[in-house]
Image: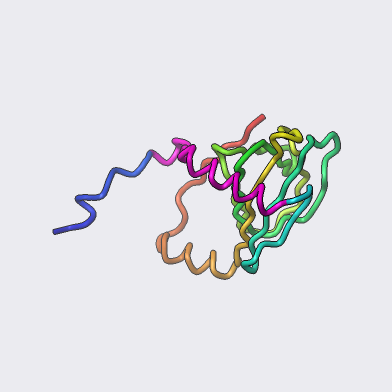
Amino acid sequence: MNAEKNAPPLPHLDAPLAPHQGDVARLGTLLRQSTPHDGLVDLRLSGVHASRSTHIHEDLIHSMQQPALCIVAQGAKSVFLGSDVYGYNPSRLLVYSVDLPVATRVTRARPREPFLTLNIDLDPRRIAELTLKAYPHGLPRAHTAGCP
């Protein structure tokens, strides 16, 4: 029997993938336990970090963002790349596949409901290898989902 015939249909590529609320709540609980204070905390696995902020940022924080997968469990953040603005929150994650100069601002956070995110560093060489395997005939046309 062909496994592909029994697989559930894939979502349309432009449709946002909604995470299961229970999974996001569980991640939030784990991140709260792992981040006793505001800031970035290195977790037990190499290249895995948690971040917490109990307040919104009035000023932009400028940095060089390295390749990473960023998953928000609670709150929201905006990332500014040139004139483009990308928002991410529990329903929208962010992936950086190359080093980028960005400015960021936490836009939703408070002491009782802090901004909580899990960041997983990505290896650019591994990304390139996987890209060649997944798209041997070249990448499909990109669709960006910026947020004002």
Judge by depth and name the residue closer to the eye, 55 or 131: 55
- Apparent side of residue 26 relative to residue 41 in the rendered image (left or right): left
Q: Is 72 displayed left or right of 136 in the figure?
A: right
Residue 17 lies in the magenta stretch: yes
Residue 43 visible here: yes
Please give the name of the residue rendered at 71% of the width and 50% of the height, measured from the top-left corner.
51
Name the foreground residue: 114 vs 63.
114
Residue 65: name its quadrant.
bottom right
* Horizontal arrangement in the rendering, residue 85 relative to residue 139 (left or right): right
Residue 117 falls within the magenta-colored stretch: no
* Image position of 1 (left or right of 51): left
Q: Residue at x 48, y 40 (%)?
A: 22
Give x and y (percent) for residue 49: 67, 58
> Residue 103, located in which quarter of the rendered image?
top right
The picture places residue 122, in percent across and down from the top left corner, at 60, 63
Residue at 63% of width from left, 52% of height from top? 118
Residue 84 visible from this viewpoint: no
The correct choice, above or below, for 91 with respect to 122 in the image is above
Q: Camera-side residue: 77 or 15?
A: 77
Q: Is residue 13 above or below residue 36?
A: above
Residue 34 vs residue 64, the one in the foreground = 34
Residue drawn at (75%, 54%) of the image: 40
x, y percent for residue 47: 65, 65
Tell me which segment is drawn in magenta: 12-35
Above or below: residue 113 compared with residue 35: above
